[in-house]
Every structure is written in structure tokens, then in C-alpha cells.
Amino acid sequence: MDSFSLKQEFEKLNLTDRRELLEELLILQELDGLVLQEASDEIKKQRDKKPCPHCKSKKVYRRGKQKNVQMYKCREPECGLWFSETTGTALYNIQLKNKWQSYLNCMEQGLSIKKIAKKLDISVQTSFDWRHKILSSLEHYIPEKLSDVVECDELELPVSEKGNQSLDRPARKRSEDFIRNDGTGNATTVQVVSAVQRNGEMFLKAVQTKRLSKEQIQEALEGRITENTTLITDKHSSYKAFAKANPTIKHKTLLAKNHVDKNDKSIHLQKVNNTHKQLRDFLRPFNGVSSKYLQNYLNWFAYLDKIHNTKTTLKKWCLTILLSDKAYLIYKLFKENAVLIRT
């Protein structure tokens, strides 16, 4: 039966039957790993051989397969290391690759780590590890430069020690239990420094502090604001000091409570304020994200914004994972500061 005939038969079904059929077909596709395989085939067409993930040399040759995974060896005398098609990527040393496509689909639905573990019949620790291996693949998609017109503001979130089994304070049962200044002198808030370009590029950086300083803004933005960029902020003194230390930036300010400058309607923070609202909505289903892992979630949020107009988002995720040769190293560094999930 050709595609046209299948479409005609599909249109004869009622809405409930259509949904059930689509769900079944999606599950079959996930179990077969077709999207992941399609992404892998596309990468092979783009490059004949995978460059060495250790020294970046393209002088490599194939050396057979192990467990159906292509193996390579680097020809550079200083390197000469073996590697596979997945070395350096989030898929390296993964035993249950057949469940990864389903896992990505669950992530797209915004499911929590525990809900995904239950749905896919994997441990909570494995679900946690997979999530952060995937999110470690997004480092390449963080914009290095922002230009033109950039709105900058911070979103304040309470410090979260979710997962910590030895808190030095009573556990918070509800979000309203949060005390901004607990009198200990320790920072109880995380400031998400948000620089959003008017055309949509965004950079989000988590800084644990009570109040942002010029030095913290300088460190967070890391020279990402290019020369002659118009930077719009509120009248926070630290932003003024930051702009003064970077005289090539055109700095414009407004009172935060006004939202839009009374004399110049182009001076506003509506883009970044809307980003903060969307970020809060994105984080809400996770019932709190530990502050030590927050940066990974910020990168995830920014990446979703980048691909939201893509029809094949699942394939885009697979391509990102397979092309990110530093993901496994980033994950290992992250893992050193991670906690063991107790089930």
C-alpha cells in the first residue's frame, strides 16, 4: 500500500483511534531506534571518517567493528590512540542504546527523572546519569558572542540543595518557606544572569550570590558582548559599572518598574522578562532543580528555544549527541560534583 492509500485509511479513523495508532507507531519507531540510526547515517554522509576526538586529527583509518560499532585508529605519531564512533559522545560506553530514543522523547515531554525511570524500566540513578550526559552535549550550542541589541537582567531563584542528605538547615517543605536573608551570611539565592539578543540568541549563567557585583557580571558574560552592541539593563549599579569597564558597549538603562522607557519605546526589557517567565514555566514540572545542576537545565532551556521551530526535534537531539565529542569529558567533570541518587 502506498503512502497516499495509507493516508486515506488513516483519515477514516476517529480521533481516538488516530491517537492510539500514532502512539503505537511512535513506540515501535523508538524501540527500533530509527531516528538515532537515521541521524548516524546522516553524519556518515557528511564525513567519511570520524576525526580523532583526542587530537582532532583527520588522519585516521578504520579498524573493524566491536559490537557493531565502527572502530578507528589515529595515524598521528604523537597520538596513535584507538577510538570508536561514539568515543567522547554522551553515548560512549552505554549498554542500553535501544532505550535512548525513548528517553529523548520523554525529555521532550518534560518528564522528571523518576517518571522517566519508571516509564522505561531503568533505575533512577541511570535516568539521572543519562539526562546529564545528554545535557553535557549542549556546550557547543552556547553562543560565544551576542551583538546588535541585547537585553540583560537577572532572575533570582532560591538556592536548592535537592538530593543533599546532610543539610545544615531544616528542609523546605514548600517554596514559600524560602528566606532570602537567613542571617548566616551565606548566599541563599542564585542569580541567573540572562543576556538575550533581540533576534532570539540567549546566554544564561547561574551565579550563586545575594546580589550581583560588577565582577560577577563581568565573569558571567566572559566578553560575549561584542563592540558597538546596545546593552539594555535596569539601573542596577553593577550593570552601570560593568558598562563603564567596557566602553565599546552602548549602554542604555530604564527603571525596572516602568518596563518600557517613557521617552524611547525601543528601550525595554520585554524580551528578557518574557524569557524569565518561560524559564520559570520550564523548571516548574521538575519540582525544584538542585542549584549545582541548574546550569545544565539553563543550557537545556536555551537549546529548546533554538530548535523549537524544527519539525524533527528528536532527530536534532540525536545529531547533537553524536556530534558532541566533548560531552563525555564534560559529564565526567560534572559527575565529580554530583550526588548519588538514593532510590
Image: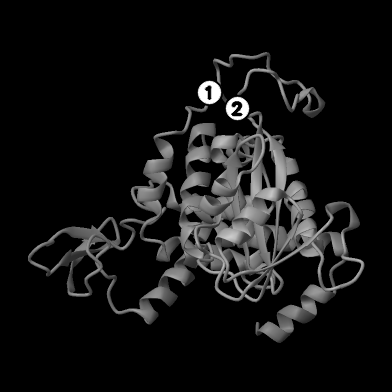
The N terminus lies in which quarter of the figure? bottom right
Q: Quadrant of residue 195?
A: bottom right
Give the residue number, with chain letter if any, for mark 1: 342
Horizontal and vertical percent position of residue 254: 82, 60
Front in this rendered view, residue 341 or 78: 78
Q: Is residue 263 left or right of residue 110?
A: right
Horizontal and vertical percent position of residue 114: 62, 35
Q: Tag 2's secondary structure?
A: loop
Horizontal and vertical percent position of residue 214: 59, 49
Q: Residue at x 59, y 36 (%)?
A: 291
Q: Earlier in the sequence, mark 2 or mark 1?
A: 2
Q: Residue at x 79, y 56 (%)?
A: 273
Give the residue number, with chain letter if any, for mark 2: 161
- Is residue 37 visible in the rendered image? The answer is yes
Q: Quadrant of residue 225?
A: bottom right
Q: Quadrant of residue 74?
A: bottom left
Horizontal and vertical percent position of residue 324: 41, 62
Q: Amino acid at mark 2?
A: Glu
Gap between marks 2 and 1 measured at Cα: 14 Å
